Image (cartoon, rainbow, N blue to C red):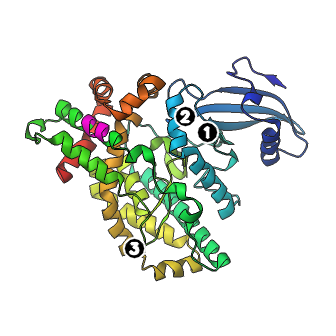
Amino acid sequence: MERSAKNITKLHDILSEKQLDHILSKTAKPGAKIISYDLESLTTGISGFLGDYLKLTLQVQEDIVRKIHLFIKTLPKNNQTKFDIILQNNFNKKEATVYKLFEEMDDTEDPNPWRPKAYIYNENMLVMSDLSIEGYKSYPVTKYLDKNHVMVTATSVARFHAAFANYATKKTLNEGKPYDFLDEYGYFRNEPLFLDPKWSQSAGKLTSNFLKEFSKNSKKFPANLEERLVDLYLKAYKDIKYYEDTFNVIIHKDLWFNNILFRYSGDVATNAILLDYQCTRFAPPAFDMMLFLYFSTNRNFRECHESEVLRHYYSVFSESLGDDTKRRLTALNYDLDTFLVWCEKARFYAMMQPAGVFPVILMDSVQAQKTFNKSETLTDLFETDRSAAAIDYAKENNIYRNKVLDLFEEIIAKYV
């Protein structure tokens, strides 16, 4: 098997013969052979914060020679701190479980899929098709989503939640008792990273310092602004959890631009695929929709369109439910009005979670690599003070500054 000169490593350092055979069984005709490959790093900067990202192209001999394009995510090899964070928070374990559940839910082909199909998924690695070859594109992180992109994403989120709801109903009927997801997968209950008070203290310090540096209203802020913000972060991170006596599903919890890919007809987005399930939790579905809105839209959009988006989500969700699931939700008194009440309950967390991570995830990938990819300094940045890096970058990048500042000032207006 030949390899390209641009390869960063040997293929068999990443995938075993057994794994390669499994991928071929899913993507090629029987008897197909790999005759060469290209394996390269996906980007020069950070393309994501919870793994290393690779692009693999296999040259396969079938009746003719053709290419199979794959995306690979692995545990970080050169950052022990990130490696430890992933293991301690069960990030990869959660994602592998979600892909296992996806196959149990429904493995049929879908012309408008809301999720990718993975060929290999375990706690060390994820391998799936390179969706860019199928025409899917990411949205620029420098912009907010417009209504078209928001609606197609809401459709995919609704179908995701409905698929799990139908799966839980099927399990309940087959087992003859209510399906207890957390009894089987208890590691979906929390994330130690965000429950650690040091994270909230660091986030509160950054938010306070950023506001004092850039907000025109900084002179009106209370003297104990930092302390009050730390308290808000501490309270918010306890809000997202399983709630008894209502409807809970697997929620994505990280629906920002890097984790959504769009397919287009001309300039119109026609479908959205949801990626990266490492941060999934088990909670009321309203948390996902409110998080998505605060991650991806500005205050003016939410004031104008939030109700319409949420009602569209619920309409698609309801249409995607089986009859047995509809009866189960009726017994839980879960309807549109209940969903909207939960959306309001979820708003506080949905504002605070993006505020805590915006200064990191909105950075240009190359700048983020310089700032947040050093194992020896990452812990200090997350647990003590990352203000300087965010403020310095904000002075150079107006778009970054304004997006972070807009959300911080909305929090001040509503909660301080």
Nearer the observer: mark 1 or 3; the answer is 3
Residue 307 in sight from this viewpoint? no
Q: Residue at x 40, y 59 (%)?
A: 287
Q: State which quadrant residue 194 falls in.
A: top left
Residue at the spot of label 1: 132
How many other residues sit within 10 Å of disc 2, few (<14), some (14-19) or many (≥20)?
A: some
Helix, strand or loop status at disc 2? helix
Residue 181 in picture, x, y percent from top left: 56, 65
Residue at the spot of label 2: 83
Q: Quadrant of the N terminus?
A: top right
Residue at the spot of label 3: 336
The dominant secondary structure in magenta is helix
Residue 286 in picture, x, y percent from top left: 40, 62
Q: Residue at x 63, y 49 (%)?
A: 96
Residue 408 is labelled as none
First in sequence: mark 2 vs mark 3: 2
Q: Residue at x 74, y 24 (%)?
A: 10
First in sequence: mark 1 vs mark 2: 2
How many discs appear?
Answer: 3
CA–CA distance in space, label 1 to label 2 = 27 Å
Q: Viewed as shown, does residue 322 lie left or right of 367?
A: right
Helix, strand or loop status at disc 1? helix
Q: Which residues are magenta?
A: 201-206
Tell which of 290 and 380 is nearer to you: 380
Q: State which quadrant residue 224 falls in.
A: top left
In the image, residue 240 sits, relative to residue 129, either above or below, namely below
First in sequence: mark 1 vs mark 3: 1
Tell which of 87 and 69 is nearer to you: 87
The reply to whether the magenta stretch includes residue 148 is no
In the image, residue 333 sits, relative to residue 137, either above or below, namely below
Residue type at tag 2: Phe
Residue type at tag 1: Ser
